[in-house]
Image (cartoon, rainbow, N blue to C red):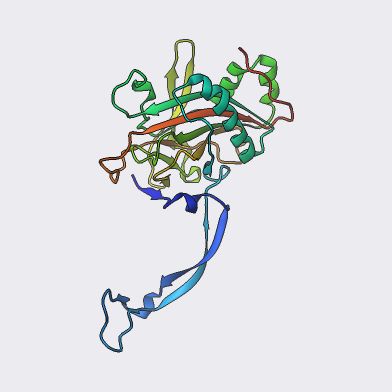
Amino acid sequence: MALMQFANPKSRIGKDAVEAELKFIDPAGGVPVTYTYEPPAGTPQRSGTYVSQRVFGRTTSLDREAFIVRQHQSRVTDFSDESVIRQVYYPEVAELVKTQTGASSVLVFDHTVRTTAPGGPERNELNEPVMVMHNDYTSQSAPRRVRELLSPEQAAQMLQHRVVEFNVWRPIRGPLQTKPLAVCDAASMKPSDFLRGERRYPVRVGEFFAIAYNARQRWHYFPDMLPSEALLIKCYDSDKSRAQFCAHGAFDDPTTPTNALPRESIETRAFAFFSPSVLPLPKQ
């Protein structure tokens, strides 16, 4: 799997685009030579013909690639406390999504804390990193989830307008080097890459996309992510003119140092509504 590495937090957070001059080799200028020691008298330290070209570099966007990373400091320090997550972290995530998307209201409805730390009663197969590429929702299961969370009247009202589901993912210990998350540029995927799968619960059956590989896919990851950074992954968008889904999943990074911290992360799921109505209360 080929992954494009973003070098550091500063390079991936900030302006949507930057234009800069880069120097490229001119093939007609002969073999470039660089001396790493004092060159012979009259010989330049660095030879070759280079040309400057103004190019654009850009961070990703939710509408184009379907994922972005943002600086986001949480007030939560103990992510093992369910009540704190719901009372403090959920509102923080809702505000982050609302700020980044311009949604009229945001409903945070679910979360999973994942870990690779050995032992402990909190670890089980369902909260280990998901090592297969997938997308959390399909065009059918996302609206169905809205109907499960809201009353029939509220759901009908919200679904008349644009609805987006986000997975907001962050490390809770860092820098994260163990089993980082890979995300795929939505523009590089084909409809045939998405295969429907089932996620079965005691009282309902969820539907997700399993991802098939094609050579056009452009995969990215953010090395050494910190708890002060949040990755917003768009898992569904009812607006088909924008990127609708973002394939993602954990992988074993061959460059992970042997003394790296265990992977500990939290993913929080939220619906962003673009209805002019105020967010309705979910069913209790």
Place of residue 4 in the rendered image (x, y in percent of width and height, measured from the top left)? 40, 50
Residue plotted at (26% across, 76% down): 37
- Front residue of 130/228: it is 228
Judge left or right: residue 160 versus residue 197.
Answer: right
Place of residue 143 in the rendered image (x, y in percent of width and height, measured from the top left)? 59, 24
For the view shown, which residue lies furthest in the top direction? 203
Judge left or right: residue 226 versus residue 178.
Answer: right
* Whether residue 127 is situated above or below residue 61 in the rendered picture: above
Quadrant housing the N terminus:
top left
For the view shown, which residue lies furthest in the right direction? 276
Residue 274 visible in image: yes
- Image quarter for residue 199? top left
Residue 195 visible in image: no
Number of marks: 0
Quadrant housing the C terminus:
top right
- Image quarter for residue 132? top left
- Front residue of 69/29: it is 69
Place of residue 18 in the rendered image (x, y in percent of width and height, measured from the top left)? 55, 59
Residue plotted at (54% across, 40% down): 72
Place of residue 139 in the rendered image (x, y in percent of width and height, measured from the top left)? 55, 28
Judge left or right: residue 28 versus residue 69.
Answer: left
For the view shown, which residue lies furthest in the bottom direction? 42
* Whether residue 87 is situated above or below residue 37 in the rendered picture: above
Residue plotted at (52% across, 51% down): 59
- Front residue of 73/164: it is 73
